[in-house]
Amino acid sequence: MSAPVVILDRDGVINQDADAHVRSLAEWHPIPGSLEAIATASRAGWRVVVCTNQSGVGRGLFPARAVDDIHRELQRRVEALGGRIDGIFYCPHAPDAGCSCRKPLPGLLQQAAAGLGFALANVPVIGDSGRDLEAARAVRATPILVRTGKGEGTLDRGEAGEAAVYADLAEAIDALVRGNPA
């Protein structure tokens, strides 16, 4: 049997979100406990995948290099904690680009599954926004909401639906690793 997979959104789940985008490594600030949670999942045998919309690239607000710098630092810090991120996938397109990879469309999750060789059905997808949960539902994955980032607003708007809800990534990963994600 292959290792279980968990898919994480980035901004608002792993790191603090920003209304005007996280534009550089200097603006990237992990949410307390999030990097440790990723390392915990990895050490427990989970394959950890990050899928994130980064429309600031397509809008010309920051270069793809800035996203790559953030992702390298994310990987470096998780590895320093004894964990690993198996893949990071991002949509660089502006909202009006008409791509299929911008969440809530499922293309980004499908790219990750095809690239890393796993099926999406029932895979936990942890996000903080309605678009993360919609993308998960579109591929029959299991949507999980965290209250960090845009999570409280997502709850207030009634977009969580049947998704399990956790305070933050650390709490969600703890539930997954213990085998009781709902």
Image: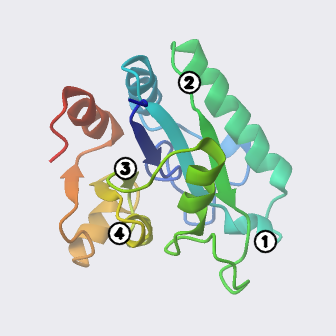
Q: Which residue is label 3 attached to?
A: 123
Label 4 SS: helix
Please give the name of the residue rendered at 85% of the width and 57% of the height, measured from the top-left corner. 63
Amino acid carrying mark 1 in the image: Gly
| Separation of marks 1 and 4 at Cα, in angstroms | 26 Å
| Separation of marks 2 and 3 at Cα, in angstroms | 18 Å
Label 3 SS: loop
Circle number at residue 137:
4
Could you tell me residue 176's position as x and y percent? 26, 35
Amino acid carrying mark 3 in the image: Val
Could you tell me residue 91's position as x and y percent? 68, 63
Is residue 108 positioned above or below 166 on the image? Answer: below
Label 2 SS: loop
Q: Which residue is label 2 attached to?
A: 84
Please give the name of the residue rendered at 47% of the width and 28% of the height, measured from the top-left corner. 35
Indicate which disc, 2 or 1, sits on the residue closer to the N terminus: 1
Is residue 4 positioned above or below 65 on the image? Answer: above
Amino acid carrying mark 2 in the image: Arg
Characterize the local packing of mark 2: few (<14), some (14-19) or many (20 or more) Cα atoms within 10 angstroms: many
Indicate which disc, 2 or 3, sits on the residue closer to the N terminus: 2
Could you tell me residue 52's position as x and y percent? 58, 56
Q: Is residue 123 left or right of residue 97?
A: left
- Nearer to us in this view, 102 or 5: 5
Please give the name of the residue rendered at 62% of the width and 32% of the height, measured from the top-left corner. 74
Could you tell me residue 23's position as x and y percent? 72, 54
Indicate which disc, 3 or 4, sits on the residue closer to the N terminus: 3
Characterize the local packing of mark 3: few (<14), some (14-19) or many (20 or more) Cα atoms within 10 angstroms: some
Amino acid carrying mark 4 in the image: Arg
Please give the name of the residue rendered at 73% of the width and 83% of the height, measured from the top-left corner. 97
**Which mark is in front, 2 or 1?**
2
Q: Which residue is label 1 attached to?
A: 58
